[in-house]
């Protein structure tokens, strides 16, 4: 299990250099002293909080062959920047850094730029450090009314909002959200706001009470699902290879499945069922930050109740172990401590 692997591969020894970061290399995560980055044309951001998510767990298992400073969920303050108007602003940042010159970027789809870097996931050091770098185009100022503990959820909340952009869900729809982890709880809230009848399917009823009742949102264990019940839309957020086969069993003919999970591995499922029942399968990744910030500012989505603990960076080994323990929702790192 990942929670057993992390402490064994964790090294707290530090060298005296410019800043500390949680570095993943050679199959191990450790806090290391590394050079403080130079901002150049980008913004140097002093990180206040960084969130640990399921993608970080998969990176530790080998997902994407990433090497470097981990972390892509963060809130911080711009400390250095060529554009002085950004200095001192509290920000969150979109994680995809496209080249802005290729045909894909020129048609406005930089999130799928073939040579893009992704903060803490692909080709770019992340935010589980005292400082991180991002282009100015990626930054969004955080309103004063949104706390750091709320703002650190903007990236996963934006991923939830992305579902409604890619596959609009009618208010009359019956929707199942598979997985009651942090992303599943965010997705369930966002979709329920639109009026759809939402069933959150998971194995941890104790988590369901950590979000307020929204519309017709309710929780259900997988074994409690009525055998003949089918829904219009299934949103797969379990982070498990078993999620897609489960979704295929629960979606109605000509219904839709939206995939949100990223994991290291290859799922096995019945391709024939997709053709036979004319199922639409839609992938969904990152989403828009402005609507996510707006939801937080208007207090329409609850996030702070999902936080289990906050650790200083030098206790990142404990933080990772707790984050990947069954039943945990969100663990934060505070590089300032």
Image (cartoon, grey):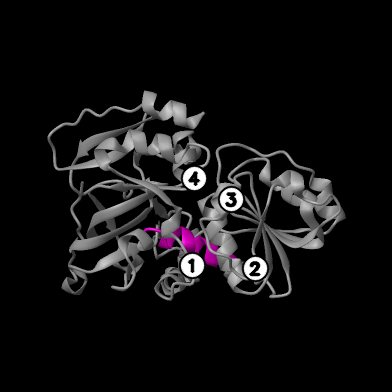
Local secondary structure at mark 3 = loop
Residue for badge 3: 180
Q: Earlier in the sequence, mark 2 or mark 4?
A: 4
Residue for badge 4: 54
Image point (48%, 31%), residue name: 2
Residue for badge 1: 301
**Residue 77 versus residue 70 in the image, above or below:** below
In this orientation, does residue 56 appear?
A: yes
Dot 2: few (<14), some (14–19), or many (≥20) neighbours within 10 Å?
A: some
The residue stretch that appears in magenta:
152-163
Image point (28%, 27%), residue name: 11
Image point (18%, 68%), residue name: 87
Image point (37%, 58%), residue name: 152
* Mark 2 vs 3: CB contact within 8 A: no
In the rendered structure, find residue 167 and report the number of the disc placed on it: 2
* Mark 4 vs 3: CB contact within 8 A: no
The CA span between labels 2 and 1 is 20 Å
The CA span between labels 2 and 4 is 23 Å
In the rendered structure, find residue 165 and report the number of the disc placed on it: none
């Amino acid at each position: 299990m990942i929670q057993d692997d992390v402490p064994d591969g964790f090294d707290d020894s530090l060298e005296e250099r410019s800043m500390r970061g949680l570095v993943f290399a050679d199959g191990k995560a450790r806090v290391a002293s590394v050079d403080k980055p130079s901002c150049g044309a980008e913004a140097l951001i002093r990180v206040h909080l960084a969130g640990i998510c399921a993608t970080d767990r998969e990176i530790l298992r080998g997902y994407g062959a990433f090497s470097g400073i981990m972390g892509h969920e963060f809130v911080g303050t711009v400390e250095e920047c060529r554009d002085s108007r950004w200095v001192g602003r509290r920000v969150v940042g979109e994680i995809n850094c496209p080249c802005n010159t290729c045909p894909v970027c020129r048609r406005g789809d930089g999130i799928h730029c073939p040579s893009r870097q992704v903060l803490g996931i692909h080709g770019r050091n992340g935010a589980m450090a005292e400082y991180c770098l991002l282009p100015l185009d990626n930054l969004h100022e955080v309103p004063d009314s949104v706390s750091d503990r709320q703002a650190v959820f903007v990236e996963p909340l934006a991923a939830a909002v992305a579902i409604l952009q890619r596959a609009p869900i009618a208010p009359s729809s019956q929707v199942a959200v598979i997985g009651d982890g942090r992303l599943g709880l965010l997705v369930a809230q966002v979709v329920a706001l639109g009026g759809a009848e939402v069933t959150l399917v998971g194995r941890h009823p104790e988590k369901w009470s950590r979000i307020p009742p929204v519309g017709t949102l309710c929780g259900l264990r997988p074994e409690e699902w009525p055998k003949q019940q089918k829904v219009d839309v299934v949103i797969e957020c379990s982070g498990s290879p078993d999620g897609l086969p489960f979704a295929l069993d629960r979606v109605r003919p000509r219904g839709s499945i939206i995939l949100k999970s990223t994991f290291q591995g290859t799922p096995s499922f019945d391709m024939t069922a997709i053709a036979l029942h004319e199922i639409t399968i839609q992938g969904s990744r990152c989403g828009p930050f402005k609507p996510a910030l707006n939801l937080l500012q208007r207090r329409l989505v609850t996030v702070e109740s999902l936080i289990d603990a906050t650790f200083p960076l030098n206790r990142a080994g404990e933080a990772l172990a707790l984050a990947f323990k069954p039943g945990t929702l969100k663990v934060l790192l505070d590089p300032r401590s």
